[in-house]
């Protein structure tokens, strides 16, 4: 069954979607991606896990090269980091609205729910190509902020924090008006707003 891109909102609202069998291969599917050997930090796995969920899928993405990537590079910890980022959240109950607000320096993937707002922030300067192919280490994102969307409950009745999935660290966030000050990070960061019941 195929649909035009404009039809996806109607289709997605009617069924749960998952990204399955994702990963990287050599041209013409000649074999697993040669740069997996260099991906000891799990950049590809991280993006496969986080991007689909924060784009509105029913769960994380699923990678298919367990033997060449996940097991060989001992990347199992990424699954725990994804679980920590969304711990305690009931996606069907939240009825998340998917947002992709503009940001001057970051890609922002946002899920606005009934009691929770989640945002995955990805530095577009740091990709598998820049790190694995070109050999450039990730650069720190510093002095950045995230504007929260309209329609959130009073933030005085909320817990606002950030989670760095690369260091496994939660940090209370500083909020001024509807702007969250972001701590310095590399590659990606999660912003989570939990409204108190």
Image (cartoon, rainbow, N blue to C red):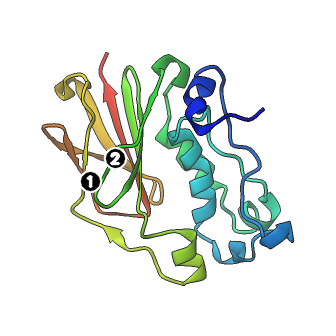
Judge from the rendering whether residue 20 lies leftward or rightward of residue 160; answer left or right: right
Classify the position of the N terminus by image quarter: top right
- CB atoms of marks 2 and 1 within 8 Å: yes
Q: Disc 1 marks which residue?
A: 182
Q: Disc 2 marks which residue?
A: 162
Q: Residue furthest bottom?
A: 135
- Residue 197: name its quadrant: top left
Which residue is more in the foreground, 95 or 165?
95
Q: Residues within 10 Å of mark 1 (few under 14, many from 20)?
A: many
Asked if residue 13 is positioned above or below residue 159 in the image, the reply reads above
- Mark 2–mark 1 Cα distance, whole angstroms, equals 8 Å
Judge from the rendering whether residue 174 lies leftward or rightward of residue 16; answer left or right: left
Q: Residues within 10 Å of mark 2 (few under 14, many from 20)?
A: many
Asked if residue 54 is positioned above or below residue 126 in the image, the reply reads above
Q: Secondary structure at mark 2?
A: strand
Q: Earlier in the sequence, mark 2 or mark 1?
A: 2
């Amino acid at each position: 069954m195929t649909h035009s891109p404009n039809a996806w909102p109607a289709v997605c609202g009617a069924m749960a979607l998952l990204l399955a069998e994702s990963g990287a291969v050599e041209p013409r599917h000649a074999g697993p991606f040669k740069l997996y050997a260099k991906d000891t930090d799990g950049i590809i796995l991280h993006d496969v896990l986080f991007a689909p969920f924060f784009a509105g899928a029913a769960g994380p993405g699923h990678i298919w090269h367990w033997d060449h990537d996940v097991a060989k590079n001992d990347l199992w910890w990424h699954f725990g980091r994804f679980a920590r980022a969304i711990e305690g959240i009931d996606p069907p109950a939240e009825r998340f609205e998917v947002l992709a607000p503009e940001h001057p320096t970051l890609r922002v993937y946002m899920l606005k729910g009934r009691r929770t707002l989640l945002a995955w922030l990805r530095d577009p300067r740091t990709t598998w190509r820049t790190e694995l192919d070109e050999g450039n280490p990730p650069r720190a994102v510093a002095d950045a902020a995230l504007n929260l969307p309209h329609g959130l409950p009073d933030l005085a009745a909320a817990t606002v924090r950030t989670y760095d999935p690369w260091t496994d660290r939660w940090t209370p966030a500083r909020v001024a008006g509807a702007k969250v000050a972001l701590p310095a990070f590399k590659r990606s960061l999660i912003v989570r707003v939990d409204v108190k019941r």
